[in-house]
Image: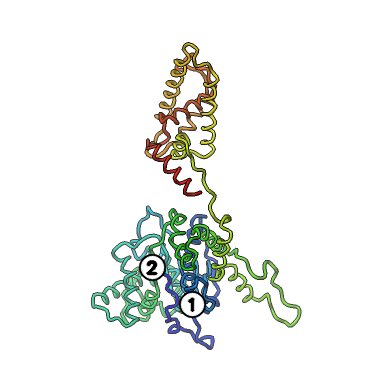
Amino acid sequence: MISVGSGDDEQYGSSTRGTMETAAQAVLRVPWDDDAGARTADLYDWQAAMAAADALRLVHDAVADDGCLQPDIAAEVICEHHEDWTVIVGTSAELVSAKHRELDSGAWTTVNQLVTKGGLRHLFDRWLSLNKLPGLRLVTCAGLKSGECAEVDEVARLLRDQAQGVELSQESLALIAKTLQKVAKELLCADGAELPGHLTGPVKSKWVDLAEDDARIETLRAFLSRLHIDKERPSRKHVAHAAPSMYMAPVLKQMRKGEVPAGAAWEAVLDLFRARMRSAGPIPGGMLPLINAAAGGSAVGTTAESQNRELARRRITIADIEIAIRLAIDNLEAYLPVSKVVYQSPLSVKMDIGRCNDTSIARAEDLRSEYLRYYRDRDETAPGEMAKRRAVNRWLLKVADEETATIPNRSNAWGPELWRALSDRLVDGYAADDSDPDAIQLDGDLALGGVCDLVHKCKVWFSPAFDVKAELARRRAQLRGAM
């Protein structure tokens, strides 16, 4: 949920500049620090995807019934500005902190986790620096464990209800009071916390018990009432598959383009955010230098101009996104993923499921063909020829069995390990031994090709056994559907 546009910004307006300042004006005016820090590429991509999802929500809401973007709606996303991104709609603004949490870490469990690892302390500091004007949102892929962590989310909702005139029960008021004390402990009593003077005062170390009329409690009430915890996002392992249908398909439907592949349009929009997250978006003046104008005395190299130029690299308007979507629609081939080879032989399918790479699969198919050609060229009617071939197959099956037994973990797939072991034994280290029948005249590559033929006949496996015919039928149906 994007919560900008709540309409209550003006109650926190500042008159220090002579006029009431809106949240959007404060966000754009106040300088920001570069807080991107070191992130891995996949976490950058996850954040870019989540910011793109927010922007697509704005586009969806701004598209009229005729499928066109309404021209009078001003909305944009600014990446890595004050927080991971900032959403601006009209005069309202919302700071968004995105915190990915791995599946093995589980849900958020404590208020301390939300404040430190969940980024609420940074949101609180930014909110104070912006005169308590913007809305606030924590985006995460992890839920909130029942107890004090879930109560923060519940209290935020209750405070919003109360601000709208809803009369709360005594139980709800008691929950608000208890949770405010817990949040105060983490936000106001943290070591090294830098707070304005009206938020500091005598408090016991690591704990705070503030009276209900304390100005600090009122600040915390205002903070939580502006906070939304968006905890329904997919993890980085699933977002690539889930995002097109979750985020792009509804926008295409609203634009009357429901027949367009959502994956292509999603990639076009995501590319915008990948660049803006690194402050690498295009700007109107390109890379022309900032200088002082020679005539008229207008300074185009001022600090304000530099800040605007930097903002331009990070901002994406809903018009930018609509253009990207329509360009993708007109150039689908440029954005559709490259089709993966659909393997259609028992050997290739079994190696694919066994997680062998494409080059190994191609080599295996070629070696099997050479092995079969070798025996076609021999006179199989010669006395004892068939017996010799059966002896070869028995020996090759014995080799495959021995090498499979040496693999330590066979719970899922072991294709690369077995392929490497067979290649080492039969090709790189090939030599006749006591177990090699005198009748075997194969070189190492042909011997490996013979094992590939055994794989094709379902006598050697690179993974737990499965219904090969059913898998082949599924893949052939997939291939027909892609045509």
- Position of residue 481 relative to residue 83, above or below, is above
- Kindly tell me whether residue 428 is visible in this rendering: no
- Position of residue 455 relative to residue 482, above or below, is above
Percent from the top left, x then y, of residue 371?
52, 25
Mark 1, secondary structure of its residue: loop
* Residue at the spot 54% in from the left edge and 54% down from the top edge: 336
- Position of residue 65 relative to residue 463, above or below, is below
In the picture provided, is 411 more to the left or to the right than 72?
Answer: left
| In the image, farthest residue toward the left | 170
Find residue 397 and report its image quarter. top left
Cα distance between the residues tagged 2 and 1: 20 Å
Q: Earlier in the sequence, mark 2 or mark 1?
A: 1
Percent from the top left, x then y, of residue 32?
54, 71
| In the image, farthest residue toward the right | 294
Q: Residues within 10 Å of mark 1 (few under 14, many from 20)?
A: many
- Which residue does the numbered mark 2 point to in the structure image? 229
Percent from the top left, x then y, of residue 75?
51, 74
Q: What amino acid is found at the position of numbered circle 1 in the picture?
A: Leu
Q: What amino acid is found at the position of numbered circle 2 in the picture?
A: Ile
Q: Nearer the viewer, residue 21 or 221?
A: 21
Q: Nearer the viewer, residue 446 or 292?
A: 446
Which quarter of the image is occupied by the N terminus? Answer: bottom left
- Which residue does the numbered mark 1 point to in the structure image? 130
In the picture provided, is 322 more to the left or to the right than 193?
Answer: right
Mark 2, secondary structure of its residue: strand
